[in-house]
Image (cartoon, coloured by chain):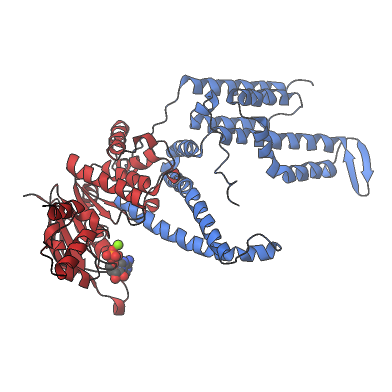
């Protein structure tokens, strides 16, 4: 049941994209997402397509993985598109079904919203597909660190993410063990309707939570005995250093952004 | 002789409700010599873990004093020095590994101490090599066996360059192979790196080669001496619910049956030597 749960969706590799500084990758992803919303005509998406194609080609991420990232949001995608089709006024009326009208304006907006969502999801998937959760955590900590003086809990957030990453596999293992133990005593986790199944999970979740709290207790004591006193005066073994390739990636992204902005003044 | 840890009239009770409150440690006076390998044994609830936490200032005496390298554990200005000097390894390796990658976990302690990055790298390499886990530095902990995880936990303490390591039943959750790995690692650290080791354990065989064995019962030290002196007291040990090493038990039974055999035989080798003499 838990076998197919992986943390994040990281696909290990040693391409340039994989090796980029996680800070740069996070920043680039943000820039790209913002740029997507600047596109105001279909031809603008050519640049976005080219950019994503370039990353996919260099990172050698199989396209099927990227499509997989789209699957969970298909419902949202369809909903957004249909809402936009039916409820956007403006343009010429193409078709009328009862009170609903399909207009050219609606179609156009639906198409743009759909494309935006798809590009947004592919862009962020590429970040998590090519960056291990651990370096993602490092990147987030380093990006947020300058803001800790204004109260952003950068270190605490990173520590929470690290501990979560460390303990998720342990807890999954434990859940499997408890489940097997309960099944050996006749518990049934697989049949019945949703309510029955949810009820069946109680004997799994109760011991799991009790154990998780005990672990948290012991971990806190162990951390304290290893001189943990929060983020102050703490150093890090792993230092992030930007390489020429990071600046190159940033430059390519900025060129694409400029092309997208320039595209706004095109006539087609 | 220099002492790394000294307890003077150490008594302790947990801050629980008034009516259930009772002394868990009772007037404990111990001096641990630097560089020694010390075993502490005692049945469940005899106060071993509570004592271990006193050595690391995780718990403070209700009465009496604990000194770590001359520093009073009640003096909060030395708290981090004390914890760095006397490192504590716990029973469950899963619940003391913090980071999702072996080398990053070993770096956790030195990072907390604010050591510069380059030196942390050196220490991590040294510590992982000392416990024989260097090849696994990039592994996630959940891919390791129990014995390997416990060695990583030990490396995490070694990397803080402690003078003394206290291990609270580090082998209790391990299979025999993992147990052997961990014990030989601890012995090596004691012999080759000169680190004082205080090993709390349930397995008598693990302390027969110790320099000193302390037996606890009901919050008190009931026996304290060399393994030979301690394990000779088979009757007393059995009375407080402890076993003795199997060979010692055999010698004890033989003696009871009227054989002329010394009662301080601790290892199979000694037994063989005695019988074939
Ligand atoms: N956190 C706690 N609060 C209250 N009592 C405790 C706590 N931890 C341990 N004790 C009690 O202290 C006694 C000694 O426990 P402990 O030091 O864990 O013994 P050992 O490690 O030898 O098994 C036991 O009677 C136990 O119930
Ligand atoms: Mg204990």
Q: Where the C terminus of chain A falls, by quadrant?
A: top right
Residue at the spot 31% in from the left edge and 30% down from the top edge: B118
Colour displayed for chain A in the image of the structure: blue
Q: Residue furthest left?
A: B1
> Residue B125 appears at what percent x and percent y?
31, 34
Image location (x, y in percent) of residue B127: 28, 38
Horizontal relation, residue A121 to residue B141: left or right: right
Query: Residue A219, percent across and down?
Result: 38, 54
**Residue B127 sits above or below residue B36 on the image:** above
Residue at left offset 61%, top offset 36%: A125
Of A15 and A120, nearer the camera is A15
- Quarter of the displayed picture in which ligand 1 can be seen: bottom left
Residue nearer the viewer, B68 or B32:
B32
Residue B237 point in image, percent of width and height:
19, 68
* Left or right side of B139 for A34: right
Instruction: Name the residue nearer the viewer: A195 or B58.
Output: A195
Which residue extends farthest bottom? Answer: B19
Would you place residue A217 above or below residue B25 in this image?
above
State how many labels appear: 0
Which chain is displayed in red in the rendered image? B
Direction from residue A82 to residue A174 in the image, left or right: left
Does residue A68 appear anywhere in the picture?
Answer: yes
- A69 in relation to A177, above or below: above
- Name the residue: 48% across, 48% down: A164
Q: Can residue B62 be seen at all in this image of the molecule?
A: no
x 45%, y 37%: residue: A138
Residues A148 and B163: in front is B163
């Amino acid at each position: 049941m838990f076998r197919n749960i992986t943390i994040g969706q990281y696909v290990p590799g040693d391409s340039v994209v994989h090796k980029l500084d996680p800070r740069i990758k996070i920043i680039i992803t943000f820039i790209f997402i913002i740029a997507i919303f600047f596109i105001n005509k279909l031809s603008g998406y050519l640049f976005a397509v080219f950019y994503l194609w370039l990353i996919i080609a260099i990172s050698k991420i199989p396209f099927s993985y990227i499509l997989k990232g789209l699957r969970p949001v298909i419902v949202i995608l369809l909903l957004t598109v249909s809402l936009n089709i039916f409820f956007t006024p403006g343009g010429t009326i193409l078709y009328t079904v009862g009170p609903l009208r399909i207009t050219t304006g609606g179609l156009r907006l639906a198409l743009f919203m759909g494309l935006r969502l798809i590009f947004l999801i592919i862009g962020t998937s590429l970040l998590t597909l090519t960056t291990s959760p651990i370096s993602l955590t490092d990147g987030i900590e380093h990006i947020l660190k300058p803001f800790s003086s204004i109260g952003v809990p950068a270190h605490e957030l990173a520590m929470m993410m690290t501990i979560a990453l460390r303990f998720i596999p342990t807890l999954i293992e434990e859940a499997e063990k408890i489940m097997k133990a309960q099944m050996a005593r006749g518990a049934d986790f697989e049949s019945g309707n949703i309510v029955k199944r949810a009820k069946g999970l109680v004997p799994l979740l109760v011991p799991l939570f009790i154990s998780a709290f005990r672990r948290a207790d012991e971990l806190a004591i162990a951390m304290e005995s290893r001189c943990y006193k929060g983020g102050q005066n703490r150093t890090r073994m792993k230092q992030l250093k930007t390489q020429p390739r990071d600046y190159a990636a940033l430059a390519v992204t900025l060129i694409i952004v400029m092309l997208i902005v320039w595209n706004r003044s095109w006539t087609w | 002789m220099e002492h790394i840890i000294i307890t003077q009239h150490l008594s302790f009770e947990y801050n629980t409700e008034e009516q259930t409150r009772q002394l868990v440690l009772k007037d404990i006076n111990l001096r641990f010599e630097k560089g020694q390998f010390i075993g502490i044994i005692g049945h469940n609830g005899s106060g071993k873990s509570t004592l271990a936490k006193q050595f690391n200032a995780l718990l403070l005496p209700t009465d009496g004093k604990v000194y770590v390298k001359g520093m009073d554990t009640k003096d909060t200005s030395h708290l981090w020095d004390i914890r760095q000097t006397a490192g504590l390894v716990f029973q469950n390796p899963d619940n003391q590994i913090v980071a999702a990658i072996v080398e990053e976990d070993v770096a956790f302690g030195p990072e907390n101490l604010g050591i510069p990055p380059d030196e942390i790298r050196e220490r991590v390499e040294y510590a992982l090599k000392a416990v024989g886990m260097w090849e696994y530095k990039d592994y996630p902990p959940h891919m390791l066996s129990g014995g390997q995880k416990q060695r990583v936990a030990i490396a995490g303490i070694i990397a803080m360059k402690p003078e003394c390591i206290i291990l609270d039943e580090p082998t209790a959750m391990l299979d025999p192979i993992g147990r052997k790995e961990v014990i030989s690692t601890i012995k090596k650290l004691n012999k080759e790196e000169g680190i004082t080791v205080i090993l709390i354990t349930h397995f008598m065989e693990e302390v027969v080669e110790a320099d000193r064995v302390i037996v606890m019962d009901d919050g008190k030290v009931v026996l304290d001496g060399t393994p030979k002196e301690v394990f000779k007291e088979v009757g007393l040990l059995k009375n407080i619910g402890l076993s003795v090493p199997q060979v010692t038990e055999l010698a004890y039974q033989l003696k009871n049956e009227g054989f002329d055999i010394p009662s301080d035989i601790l290892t199979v080798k000694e037994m063989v030597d005695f019988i074939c003499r």
